[in-house]
């Protein structure tokens, strides 16, 4: 069996029916070797039993039964610790994703490696040429937080590909996905190249808020996220992702 190119890391808390869809549709993935690491954050016995069954049936490569709830950031950090040392990328994946096409992962890695061909054009602006070469961080979605900072484009974390060489552990003293956002912003400031695919949903369905970790209230004692400060002034590429001959059609930089 080939060594994995991508280590897919899925933090989980309860909601066995949600991660069931994720794992079963993930099986269709083709074209690139990968492993699946599920970090369960102290779920109930019924959830653990279902996850053990998925592992026995081959859908999970490594199942980590965390004795405490480390939330999203902690789960990702633990997953990286259990990743095959041969993998080039970590893919942080929410459990509420259902996949629709077997080539979804090949497309993500192709853009990260700089091997995708597309016609560059910019939404309503003059044509732009994408930067050549590899990217270190590629997200399958983005947030455009105009209410936080005008024209602030930042990568989402529900399906986030990170090159091993730029990985940094996520801070545990931030609520929700704050640790991921801070770590990504810091990597970009240190020279990592980041891109987001703004029209990637045809490749999967994201049932936002359905994953178990999203139901846990943030700790009031944690540090307040500073999204505007973290991403202000950073360069983020965005590429539309369509089907057909012009599938990679629109490119822009924030």
Image (cartoon, rainbow, N blue to C red):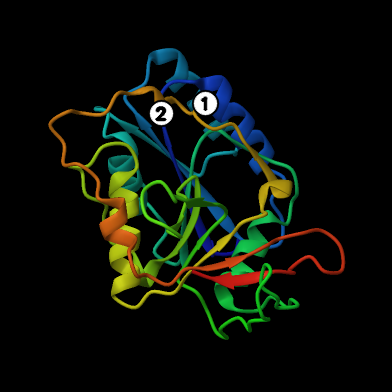
158 vs 221: above or below: below
x, y (%) of residue 198? 61, 56
Q: Which residue is tagged 2?
A: 214
In the picture, measured across the screen, residue 153 lies left or right of residue 181, that is right
Relative height, residue 196 to residue 51 (above, below): below
Few, some or many C-alpha atoms within 10 Å of disc 1 (few <14, some 14-19, many ≥20)? some
Q: Determine which residue is flagged by label 1.
A: 210
Quarter-wise, where is residue 86 in the image? Answer: bottom left
Residue at image position (21%, 49%) is 171
- Which residue sits at x=66%, y=34%? 24
- Could one spot residue 32 in this view of the protein? no
Residue 166 point in image, percent of width and height = 35, 70
Mark number displayed over residue 157: none
Residue 144 coordinates in the image, percent (x, y): 49, 52
**Please, is residue 80 above or below residue 23 in the view?**
below
Rate crowding at label 2 as few (under 14), some (14 to 19) or many (20 or more) other CA atoms within 10 Å.
some
Is 34 on the left-hand or right-hand side of 39? right
Q: CA distance from mark 2 to mark 1?
A: 7 Å
Identified at 64% across, 57% down, the residue is 105
- Quarter holding the N terminus is bottom right
Question: Is 222 located above or below residue 216 in the figure?
Answer: below
Q: Position of residue 81 (x, y in %)?
A: 31, 53
Contact between marks 2 and 1 (CB within 8 A): the answer is yes
Inspect this view and state whether residue 168 appears: yes
Q: Secondary structure at mark 2?
A: helix
Give SS at disc 1: loop
Residue that lies at the very extreme toward the left in this rendered image? 221
Q: Nearer the viewer, residue 177 or 74?
A: 177
């Amino acid at each position: 069996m080939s060594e994995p190119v991508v280590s897919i890391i899925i933090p989980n808390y309860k909601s066995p029916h949600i991660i069931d869809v994720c794992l079963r549709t993930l099986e269709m993935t083709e074209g690139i070797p990968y492993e699946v690491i599920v970090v369960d954050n102290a779920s109930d016995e019924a959830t653990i039993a279902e996850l053990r069954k998925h592992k026995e049936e081959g859908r999970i490569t490594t199942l980590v039964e965390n004795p405490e709830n480390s939330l999203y950031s902690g789960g990702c950090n633990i997953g990286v610790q259990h990743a095959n040392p041969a993998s080039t990328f970590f893919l942080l994946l929410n459990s509420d994703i259902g996949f629709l096409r077997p080539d979804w992962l090949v497309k993500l890695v192709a853009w990260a490696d700089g091997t995708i061909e597309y016609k560059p054009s910019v939404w309503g602006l003059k044509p732009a040429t994408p930067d050549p070469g590899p990217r270190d961080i590629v997200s399958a979605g983005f947030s455009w937080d105009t209410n936080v900072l005008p024209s602030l484009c930042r990568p989402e974390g529900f399906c986030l590909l990170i090159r091993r060489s730029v990985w940094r552990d996520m801070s545990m003293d931030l609520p929700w996905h704050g640790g991921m956002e801070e770590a990504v912003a810091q990597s970009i400031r240190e020279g990592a190249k980041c891109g987001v695919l703004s029209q990637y949903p045809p490749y999967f369905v994201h049932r936002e808020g359905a994953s178990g970790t999203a139901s846990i209230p943030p700790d009031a004692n944690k540090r307040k996220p500073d999204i505007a400060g973290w991403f202000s002034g950073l360069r983020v590429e965005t590429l539309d992702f369509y089907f057909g001959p012009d599938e990679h059609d629109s490119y822009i930089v924030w």
